[in-house]
Amino acid sequence: MAAKGDLLLEMSGVQKRFGGAVALRGTGLKIRAGEIHALLGENGAGKSTMLKILAGVHANDGGSIKLGGKDFVTGSPEASIDQGVAVIYQEPSLFLDLSLAENVFIGRQPKKGVVIDWKFAQSEAAKLFKELGVELDPKRQARGLSIADQQVVEIAKALSMNANIILMDEPTAALSASEVSRLMTVMRSLKSANKAVIFVSHRLDEVFAISDFITVMRDGATVSENPVEKTNLQKVIKEMVGRELNEMFPKTKNKVGEVVLDVHDLTNPAYFRNISFTVKKGEIVALAGLVGSGRSEVARAIFGVDKYESGSVTLNGKDLPKGSPEDAMARKIALVPEDRRQQGLFMIAGVNRNISMESFNKLVDRGLINFKRERALTNTWRDKLSIKFANQADPVDRLSGGNQQKTVLAKWLATDPDLLIVDEPTRGIDVATKAEVHRLVNQAASEGKAVLMISSELPEVLGMADRIIVMREGRQVAELSREEATQEKIIAAATTGKRGA
Amino acid sequence: MFANLKLSSIRRSWDTAIILLLALVLIFASATTGTFLTSTNIFYIFSNTSEIMIIAFAMTFLIILGEIDLSVASILALSSSMLGYSYVRGVPIWGAILICLATGTICGFINGYLVTKLGLGSLAVTIGALALYRGIANGLLGENTVNEFPSAATDFGLKSIGSTFMPRTLPLILLFGIFFALLLHRTPFGRRTLAIGQSPEAAKFAGVDVVKHKLIVFTFTGFMSGVAGMVYTFRFSTAQADNGVGLELLVISAILLGGVSIFGGIGTIWGVVAGVLLAGSVESWLTLQEIEAKWRTIVTGILLLISVAAPVLVQKSKARRERMALKKSG
Ligand SMILES: Nc1ncnc2c1ncn2[C@@H]1O[C@H](COP(=O)(O)OP(=O)(O)OP(=O)(O)O)[C@@H](O)[C@H]1O
Ligand SMILES: [Mg+2]
């Protein structure tokens, strides 16, 4: 076993091409035992590709990878596991009907003779959970576990397979603040067990809070490698983006007009009860709260993807029929959904096809889609949001995560809506584009649109919103004005239901 | 994600491949059989594939949506029977034709209604409908056949345009072909069809009325089966209850051969046209070689299996690694 600080993994000059597109052009990465290592870079810089090479999903085309001084075998997930590398995906796929212990030991059940020794599995799993500082019950079913807890189960599984290097690709993107701090606890436990953690994140405050070492990539190459003490936020951003970035949340003061959206006593007992609020012209209202507090469900009910039991939704003074996204769209509502892969995109369809999906009225000429206009529309939004792709017709599946998110945003911003609902709009988006998305949302508001924003990133909520409605377990527990809102107040309301100090 | 990606790019090359394959088959057939590329034989290939082509244009949309209609051949028979039944009872021929088309449309609507509004699976519903519509046709005509139709109608079914290789039904088929190709590839309706097939959930979030959309496609598949019923009736100058038995399998196999994914979401009209003509040419070549009908059926079966299995097998081997990775992660 490597001692703390020993060089564990050394990647140098690593290259990877996908067809004609170069994803990595000679990247280096040095990982030491007992270290939390952040891998940063803009969308499409090649971070996920690096991790996928280590995970055995892709084989590298060139360069060298040494693990403990020996050549690292790439291109096979089994080989990666054998070499002590484990991946924790952003959205783990546990077997929901099995217990946590069964999930940890799936495929490698400990045996006593021929029978599976569940007692042993359970006590082992319990021990692992304890080591990680999260006391989950190994006997409970995986169903109903939050994403954060599912990640913990995956990490326990990795430990049980003696992984030394744990890869996490944007593990916090789908987590709320309190879950993030718990994941950090887990990461610190891994560190003290002398494991190496490599993680990717676009939430730079977290990166500086937890990591020991930061490697920054740009355009498929490594641009800097520094211990965290030797660098800072501005420097890292400059290295990622290649230039200085000024204000992060360019909030403008808009003229607030009449009520656009009026939600009254909305109830769907499974998810939320008695939700009432308004959003006015030119206003940005944020729904804050923990993941699972019912925010997304409220948005979905307004847009009509889900039905609700009682209450009403009024748009510009007229009732909006329930359960009809077609009507919602016709009345100029846009919803940028939470889950881009399942809800926001047609993964095998081209970037152009995805972006134009809601804008046919602008593209159709005598009943037929005008391809020239479709190309122009795609180019316009590629430039506005700096979406990175090789060809317009490339399936969005080939885009990096952040560029997929930008594609969903483009598709809905292109509809020029009266009410823009955005659910985690900047999930997985890099700093520079995040600022750009914030600018676009602000601009939409200043043009007189009403904006309803759901976000788990408190700085984003505080920076963008005129008013903040906090939800907890399906209920509306607080409403804060921009002036009175602080991180502490929001967290207090979201976790205890009290308006906080 | 990788599996889908691979599947889609293979599919995309598949419908170009099928056009090349069609060209190869034509070259091979004409080289081995002198009578293959004669205008009479080409006339027969077009003629014999008329109904398959007509139904396939519409059914392509259904399969792209991730649905299927196994009752199309029964709809063909029922609408053909209605045509004959009403004509011998004194309805003028154009009126009988309208009744025939209306019958098809109604049958398609019923299928769509049962599938979408009651949420029943299209396989189960249309297997039932397959028996039901054929049964009604039997009740209507029994063992009888109607085979006196105005000569204008039967000429339309039987004759060629002048002394060319083109059947008189060809312009109608071409018109439908252009219409459905534009519908699928150039209109919002077509985009939504593909979208629903690729991800019903994302389609819902995109404001597509999935239920209404499917209902429309089922209905026009019924209508096109009615059109096929009319063409069939005039081509054989016969309206009877067992017209077109088993035709649904030929339609489905031609569509899959044409590169439409059985899982939905992927497909082109030109691929399907090539698929239908390929199946028709192979059939014709086997006939000219005087190969027995049962062997021809076997060949059709093999073609169907290849067209379903090949893309999946290629994808499986290529994406094995990626899928292993995903599984390992789970
Ligand atoms: N399977 C693939 N086929 C083609 N191109 C790909 C594929 N996977 C990644 N790429 C390309 O490689 C480049 C790097 O992608 P990667 O996913 O590594 O970016 P990333 O740094 O993780 O970005 P993000 O922050 O958006 O997640 C991108 O330009 C992407 O389009
Ligand atoms: Mg990524």
Image (cartoon, rainbow, N blue to C red):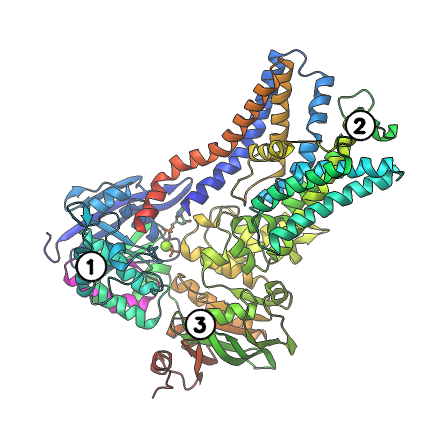
- Locate residue A193 relative to residue B176 in the image: left or right: left
Which dot, 3 or 2, sits closer to the camera? 2
**Amino acid type, residue under disc 1 in the picture:** Gln
Mark 2 crowdedness (10 Å alpha carbons): few <14, some 14-19, many ≥20: many
User: Does the numbered disc 1 mark a residue whose Cβ is under 8 Å from ligand 2?
Assistant: no
- Residue A375, position as x, y percentages in the image: 58, 50
Q: Quadrant of residue A25?
A: top left
Residue at 62% in and 56% down: B117
Residue at 86% in and 42% down: B95
Q: Which mark is residue B237?
A: 2
> Which residue is the site of mark 1?
A122
- Residue B122, position as x, y percentages in the image: 58, 46
Observer-nearest of A69 and B157? B157
Residue B54: within the magenta?
Answer: no
Residue A199: within the magenta?
Answer: yes
- On the same chain, marks 1 and 3? The answer is yes
Observer-nearest of B296 and A421? B296
Mark 1 crowdedness (10 Å alpha carbons): few <14, some 14-19, many ≥20: many
Q: Which mark is residue A380?
A: none
Q: Which residues are magenta?
A: A188-211
Q: Secondary structure at mark 3?
A: loop
Compared with residue A255, is residue A109 higher up or lower down, i.e. above or below? above
Q: Between marks 1 and 3, how big is the CA–CA gap?
A: 33 Å
Q: Between marks 3 and 2, how big is the CA–CA gap?
A: 65 Å
Mark 3 crowdedness (10 Å alpha carbons): few <14, some 14-19, many ≥20: many
> Which residue is the site of mark 3?
A294
Question: Which chain is mark 1 on?
Answer: A
Question: Which chain is mark 2 on?
Answer: B
Observer-nearest of A389 and A191? A191
Residue at 64% in and 65% down: A330
Q: Between marks 1 and 2, how big is the CA–CA gap?
A: 76 Å
